[in-house]
Image (cartoon, helix red, strand yellow):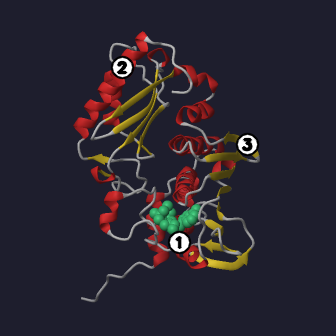
Amino acid sequence: MADIIKLLPDHVANQIAAGEVVQRPASVVKELLENAIDAQATEIKLIIKDGGKSLIQVVDNGIGMSVTDARLSFERHATSKIQKAEDLFCLDTKGFRGEALASIAAIAHVEMLTKPEHDEVGTHLKIEGSKIVHQEVAVTPKGTSLTVKNLFFNIPARRNFLKSHQVELRHITDEFHRVALAHPNIEFHYYNNGSELFSLPKANHRQRIVHVFGSKTNQKLVPIQEDTKVVKISGFINKPEFAKRSRGEQFFFVNHRFIRSPYLHHSVVAAFEGLIKSGTHPGYFIYLEVDPSSIDINIHPTKTEVKFDDEQTLYAILRSCVKHSLGQFNIAPALDFEH
Ligand code: ADP
Ligand code: MG
């Protein structure tokens, strides 16, 4: 029988990988914001048009890229963040798969302007369908600007699946909230169709939460704090009386990364037992710091799931930490802004 197996060309492999990484405009926003953070930006601008369907742009003042790196960044498995498999167990960056830019460039029209701090001039690249179609030297500030237009231009089924501008914008804003809450030490600006939706100065955690969700949030927050060998916990829970029927203000961050964890959510709910009506959900902003070697985040391309080495211990510590704060709050309801 004749041989029939062929290696897929790169642009096809990229398009397949893109299906996993990029579900909608908000996934692009997440990847670009994370890249800006990994590039040590202190100020990040997010610019959107039509819920991200016409334009997504992220501008950072981070370390930028050399011309060679700029070109290479669009190759699959091209990353500056890990070099060997063991590095996966001591990650201190958001990215490590080297797939985001390659995936995005396979399904959208991408433009990059980038310059490292000490270079005289920078690089301007245009990429269409995984190919670099334009390259020139450019005068541009330190950092990187990534522009993504015509998302899913070559995948009509995905393009048609996109929801209204408002719905896509809501997903982007959810993603923006998560990143902004995880990094209060970074200044963020977020524009949609020319109007500024958020302008967030560098702040502490409490101030950032208040800037994101409004001044009324401040009175809801009760600080939590625990420091053990297994985990360092900080952040806030909402007072029981603010529990809501709808879910929404529930945030877990593990080592500055937003994650979903029904298991840990349950531990917080267990701590609130008897204090909130059944069918309502407590709000919380919980920051966990653990040894990077005790978790695995390489479970799904979007990295919002984490496997913990010792989930049960974490569950117990978190529950007692939240319980403790709820108890303290009952005897000392006045909490000041500085905590
Ligand atoms: P990953 O983030 O997993 O490494 P990406 O495809 O997102 O993969 O990016 C590839 C590489 O391009 C990164 O490892 C980094 O070196 C570089 N890069 C991407 N975005 C930026 C940026 N905003 N500033 C500086 N370098 C960047
Ligand atoms: Mg990345």
Residue 80 showing in the rendered view: yes
Cα–Cα span, label 3 and label 1: 30 Å
Q: Is residue 103 shown left or right of residue 140?
A: left
Q: Which residue is drawn at 70% across and 46% down?
A: 192
Instruction: Give the structural element (helix, strand or loop) at label 3.
Output: strand
Q: Which amino acid does label 3 sit on?
A: Glu
- Give the residue at mark 1: 73
* In the foreground, 337 or 316: 337
Q: Which amino acid does label 2 sit on?
A: Phe
Q: Is residue 136 shown left or right of residue 213?
A: right
Q: Which amino acid does label 1 sit on?
A: Ser
Q: Residues within 10 Å of mark 3 (few under 14, many from 20)?
A: few
In the displayed structure, 213 sits above or below 45; it is: above
Q: Is residue 115 shown left or right of residue 82?
A: right
Q: Where is residue 176 in the image (x, y as percent from the top left)?
A: 57, 44
Q: Residue 196 carries which label?
A: 3
Cα–Cα span, label 2 and label 3: 37 Å
- Give the residue at mark 2: 272
Q: In which quarter of the image is the N terminus?
A: bottom left
